[in-house]
């Protein structure tokens, strides 16, 4: 015999390319070398392969790795090392698995989301050879990758993941979206049909209508797009309309008609059509004008005014039919203002016109006509201005007054009337010293023995059917009289910080006259206000007047014969000021009622209130707002804005503005609707194979930023730092969890929770890991029991998703329980028990285990030994004595060393070879074990079973089975070595 080290046959090639999902055997054969030879396999030069991770078959002169189903994770450099006592040899090859990409089935074939929500579609590759290329398509048109925020979509791609995001969905985004991922070995595609739930959009059209009174009109409201069904409503001036004898509403699938019959001026107004569906609403506004001839407010037939006075004639038109045109006539001749030098001025406004006389003269006496017209007709109104030309007379007290009023022209009959200070003097006056004599062409007023109180303004008014004329005379009776003052205005309104002069004028009275002023009954000194005195007047000058200057001011004139006084109420007006009680920042939940109040604490009336939102007047720009939910109430000193059923569109800056003739004030409030986040519904179940990649996307559809995302698994927070395989990405609007190389213990319920200051939402998905069962093959498979003894075969599952199902076969025929054959099964192992062996029990036994994701099997060979007949009785007797009389126990030896990976299950059977009345114990590194937590021990009189679930590195050690009876004890042991992804971390911790 030649003693030599092993010499291995080379692999077929240094690089072997294989297709994914195929099966393959990588052999390592001995050309020469002395036995026994030991084989070891390595991957990528450092990872020693064990039979628990790979199916490795070892024979005397050959070893092979069996790949039942290749995938991309099997790519790598494999080294076979063979050694004996004389040396070693090794061979190396590289396996390249040509694996087409496979996309996670996370796509939903149909998606339905509302407009303005956020859409995120992930495309995650769970297997496939690198490099990978991703492409996105919409309706078979490629979407190019970009990061331009102005465009409607974004595509972000990592090594194994790409996702398409549309930040604000529009109706035009509906369609078929597909993700195509490819590599040199193939491609995969997933698609989803997106339906955008869109709010209605009305077809815009003419918004102002003019119709003639008595005609019919039809308003049309058409839906251009939107998700059915729709509901239509019609309003006039924000009041909902119903069918009426002069109106009819007809609504169909996508349109509505409002017909008005025999329209009149009361039909003038703002009409709106509102269409709603479950995703929103739209409005269309119409303004209707009914044209009719204007109506003008009538002027007095005549107006008497004094010479040198100023006066304004106002002409007011009552009509909704615009535009309106005004024209002024003087004695039926058009009147045109000729510029700044003219003694009168004409101003035209939308519904009125004014004729202003700057300083009346006798030439202004005439008949003035205001003519108003529109497209439908004309109306007029006229008045006659009578200018009183004044004369002045002064006569002594006690004298006789004769006032003559002659007629120079005019048709008879003629009527005369006399007035004193605009009060008519009767012919039969109760004052006997006053008399009137009327003649056809003149009239005479006579006063005997004039007295001081006869002073005044005397006027003679003469009239016939064709018109009137007037003359007046100011009479002053001189005598020893008390002073007489010209009346001050009853009320004077002024603005703060302005200057004003109060003038107190003497009409009559014996001089000297002394003047003095008082306010609210209290005398005013010259130190308080500036005074300007003369013999016939007194001026009090108020500088930069304030609000506290308001009051009743009285001027008193006094001489030696008496006194007179005149008073005025002075009101100092001020600009408005609001009570600043409204908070500048407010927030309320959607669907609540918003009430904003604006209170004026000062300011001269009338006050005008306005409400604005984001700079737009809510009443003037009513087409911008849902006026069915907005209402404004106004009082003399406050206003209130109410918004019903607030939604996110109502968020904004609300301001209240109050004005009067003297200024304005405003206050504002920023209002936010509490919009809690909302997530799209997750796919409830993901089922993926071991070592694939799991990606779960969590993106918000609605909700105000900032958002905070949380991930949990089975109710416990997931910390990214706890496992290098786990990666959590967070952006403003989404979060994503990625788990690489998923293992069986990654299965569970994953939930994403998103929160902002207004609320919280969460969604969950169940991850089911497709883990095919794997049998522990580190056991003795060849056994030669002696006939007529008990024999036990154990088949243990070290990994695999539950439930698992066991099947036993003998010589490829299914086994059934008999009185001599018993089968025990649970989720970790199955035991085949032969109560009493015989020659017929010899054969090839197969244990098959299966679950939803795959199968595994293992072969046991049993050769039952039968002793010679002549020795049978003695042996049987001896055997019986060993079991029954006084024999110490003997155990079937355990395998010396077992290697398993962490998180798997360790099950070992310690069976009795001979002996009786046995008591079993298990020890680990010299310490007694008992059933506790993940350790379970099951004892019978013939065997003991030790099972440890969810193995960890710390479970490595020497496990010893001890069997005892009254006649002695024995033991057998095995060394358990746990390997796994966390091995290096644990060792580092021990070293530290």
Image: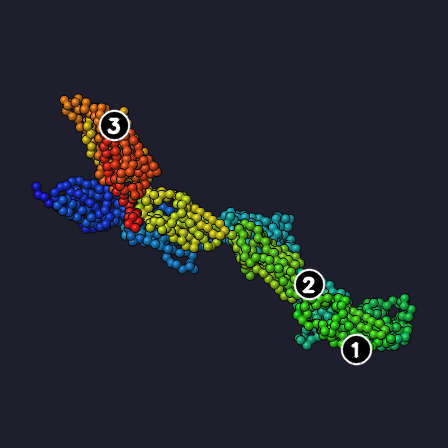
Q: What kind of element bears circle 2? A: strand
Q: Please identify, in this view, whether the residue under mark 3 or under mark 1 is nearer the observer.
A: 3
Counting residues from the start of the chain, the first of labels 2 and 3 encountered is 2
Question: Colour mode?
Answer: rainbow
Q: In the figure, residue 328 lies in which quadrant?
A: bottom right
Looking at the image, residue 258 sits to the left or right of residue 478; the answer is left
Q: Is residue 614 visible?
A: yes
Q: How many marks?
A: 3
Q: Residue at x 17, y 43 (%)?
A: 38
Q: Is residue 857 visible?
A: no
Residue beneath disc 1: 535
Of residue 200 and residue 703, the one placed in the foreground of this image is 703
Q: Please identify, in this view, whether the residue under mark 2 or under mark 3 is nearer the observer.
A: 3
Of residue 282 and residue 972, the one placed in the foreground of this image is 972
Q: Residue at x 67, y 62 (%)?
A: 606
Reply above or below: 729 against 792.
below
Q: Residue at x 19, y 51 (%)?
A: 14
Q: Gap between marks 3 and 1, in whole Å?
A: 151 Å
Of residue 820 and residue 353, the one placed in the foreground of this image is 820
Give residue 626's mark.
Answer: none
Give residue 186's position: percent from left, percent from top.
29, 50
Give residue 317's mark.
Answer: 2
Give residue 185's position: percent from left, percent from top.
27, 50
Looking at the image, residue 112 sits to the left or right of residue 885; the answer is right
Q: Gap between marks 1 and 2, in whole Å?
A: 50 Å
Counting residues from the start of the chain, the first of labels 1 and 2 encountered is 2
Reply above or below: 259 against 603.
above
Residue beneath disc 3: 966
Counting residues from the start of the chain, the first of labels 3 and 1 encountered is 1
């Amino acid at each position: 015999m030649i003693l030599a080290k092993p010499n291995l046959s080379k692999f077929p090639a240094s690089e072997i390319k294989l297709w994914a999902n195929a099966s393959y055997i990588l052999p390592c054969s001995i050309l020469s070398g002395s036995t026994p030879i030991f084989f070891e396999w390595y991957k990528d030069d450092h990872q020693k392969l064990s039979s628990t991770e790979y199916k490795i078959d070892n024979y005397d002169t050959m070893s092979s790795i069996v790949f039942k189903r290749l995938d991309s994770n099997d790519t790598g450099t494999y080294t076979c090392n063979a050694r004996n006592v004389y040396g070693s040899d090794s061979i190396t090859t590289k396996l390249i698995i040509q694996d087409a990409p496979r996309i996670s089935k996370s796509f939903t074939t149909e998606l339905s989301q509302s407009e303005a929500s956020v859409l995120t579609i992930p495309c995650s590759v769970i297997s496939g050879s690198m490099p990978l290329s991703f492409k996105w398509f919409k309706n078979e048109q490629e979407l190019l990758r970009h990061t331009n925020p102005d465009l409607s979509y974004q595509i972000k791609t990592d090594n194994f993941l790409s996702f398409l995001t549309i930040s604000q969905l529009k109706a035009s985004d509906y369609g078929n979206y597909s993700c195509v991922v490819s590599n040199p070995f193939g491609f995969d595609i997933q698609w989803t049909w997106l339906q955008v739930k869109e709010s209605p959009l009305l077809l815009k059209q003419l918004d102002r209508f003019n119709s003639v009174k008595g005609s019919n009109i039809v308003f049309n409201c058409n839906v251009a797009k939107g998700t059915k069904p729709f509901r239509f409503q019609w309003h006039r001036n924000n009041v909902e309309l119903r069918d009426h004898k002069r109106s009819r509403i007809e609504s169909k699938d996508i349109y509505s008609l409002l017909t008005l019959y025999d329209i009149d001026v009361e039909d003038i107004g703002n009409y709106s059509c509102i269409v709603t569906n479950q995703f929103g609403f739209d409005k269309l506004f119409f303004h209707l004008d009914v044209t009719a001839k204007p109506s003008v407010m009538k002027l007095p037939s005549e107006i008497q005014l004094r010479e040198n006075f100023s006066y304004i004639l106002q002409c007011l038109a009552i009509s909704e039919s615009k535009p309106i045109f005004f024209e002024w006539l003087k004695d039926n001749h058009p009147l045109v203002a000729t510029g700044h030098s003219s003694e009168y001025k004409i101003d035209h406004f939308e519904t009125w016109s004014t004729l202003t006389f700057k300083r009346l003269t006798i030439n202004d006496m005439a008949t003035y006509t205001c003519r108003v017209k529109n497209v439908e007709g004309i109306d007029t109104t006229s008045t006659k201005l009578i200018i009183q030309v004044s004369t002045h007379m002064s006569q002594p007290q006690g004298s006789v007054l004769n006032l003559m009023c002659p007629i120079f022209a005019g048709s008879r009959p003629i009527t005369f009337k006399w007035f004193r200070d605009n009060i008519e003097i009767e012919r039969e006056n109760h004052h006997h010293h006053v008399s009137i004599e009327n003649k056809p062409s003149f009239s005479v007023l006579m006063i005997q023995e004039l007295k001081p109180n006869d002073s005044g303004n005397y006027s003679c008014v003469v009239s016939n059917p064709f018109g009137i004329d007037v003359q007046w005379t100011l009479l002053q009776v001189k005598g020893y009289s008390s002073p007489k003052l010209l009346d001050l205005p009853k009320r004077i309104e002024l603005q703060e910080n302005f200057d004003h002069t109060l003038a107190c004028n003497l009409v009559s009275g014996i001089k000297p006259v002394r003047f003095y002023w008082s306010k609210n009954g209290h005398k005013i000194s010259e130190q308080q206000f500036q005074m300007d005195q003369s013999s016939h007047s007194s001026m009090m000058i108020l500088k930069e007047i304030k609000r506290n200057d308001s009051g009743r001011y009285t001027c008193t004139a006094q001489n030696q014969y008496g006194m007179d006084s005149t008073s005025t109420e002075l009101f100092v007006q001020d600009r408005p000021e609001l009570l600043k009680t409204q908070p500048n920042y407010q927030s309320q939940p959607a669907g609540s009622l918003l009430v904003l109040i604006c209170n004026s604490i000062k300011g001269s009336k009338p006050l005008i209130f306005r409400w604005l939102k984001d700079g737009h007047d809510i009443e003037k720009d009513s087409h911008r707002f849902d006026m069915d939910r907005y209402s404004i109430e106004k009082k003399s000193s406050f206003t209130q804005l109410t918004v019903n059923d607030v939604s996110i569109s109502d968020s904004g800056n609300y301001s209240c503005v109050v004005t009067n003739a003297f200024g304005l004030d405003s206050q504002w409030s920023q209002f936010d609707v509490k919009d809690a986040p909302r997530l799209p519904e997750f796919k409830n179940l993901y089922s993926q194979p071991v070592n694939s990649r799991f990606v779960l996307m969590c993106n918000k559809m609605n909700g105000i930023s900032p958002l905070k995302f949380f991930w949990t698994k089975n109710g416990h927070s997931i910390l990214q730092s706890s496992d290098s395989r786990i990666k959590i990405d967070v952006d403003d609007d989404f979060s994503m969890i990625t788990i690489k190389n998923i293992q069986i213990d990654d299965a569970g319920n994953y939930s994403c929770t998103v929160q902002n200051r207004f609320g919280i939402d969460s969604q969950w998905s169940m991850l089911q890991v497709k883990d095919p069962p794997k049998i522990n093959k580190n056991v003795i498979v060849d056994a030669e029991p002696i006939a007529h003894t008990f024999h036990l075969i154990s088949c243990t599952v070290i990994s695999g998703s539950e439930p698992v199902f066991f099947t036993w076969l003998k010589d490829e025929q299914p086994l059934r329980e008999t009185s001599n054959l018993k089968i025990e099964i649970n989720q970790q192992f199955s035991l085949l028990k032969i109560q009493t062996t015989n020659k017929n029990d010899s054969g090839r036994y197969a244990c098959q285990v299966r679950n939803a994701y795959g199968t595994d099997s293992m072969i046991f060979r049993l050769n039952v030994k039968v002793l010679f007949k002549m020795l049978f009785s003695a042996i049987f007797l001896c055997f019986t004595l060993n079991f029954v009389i006084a024999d110490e126990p003997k155990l079937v030896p355990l395998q010396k060393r077992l290697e398993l990976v962490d998180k798997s299950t360790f099950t070992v059977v310690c069976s009795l070879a001979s002996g009786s009345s046995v008591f079993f114990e298990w020890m680990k590194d010299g310490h007694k074990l008992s059933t506790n937590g993940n350790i379970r021990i099951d004892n019978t009189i013939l065997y003991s079973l030790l099972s440890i679930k969810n193995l960890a590195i710390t479970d490595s050690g020497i496990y010893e089975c001890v069997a005892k009876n009254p006649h002695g004890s024995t033991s057998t042991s095995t060394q358990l070595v746990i390997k796994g992804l966390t091995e290096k971390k644990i060792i580092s911790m021990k070293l530290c």
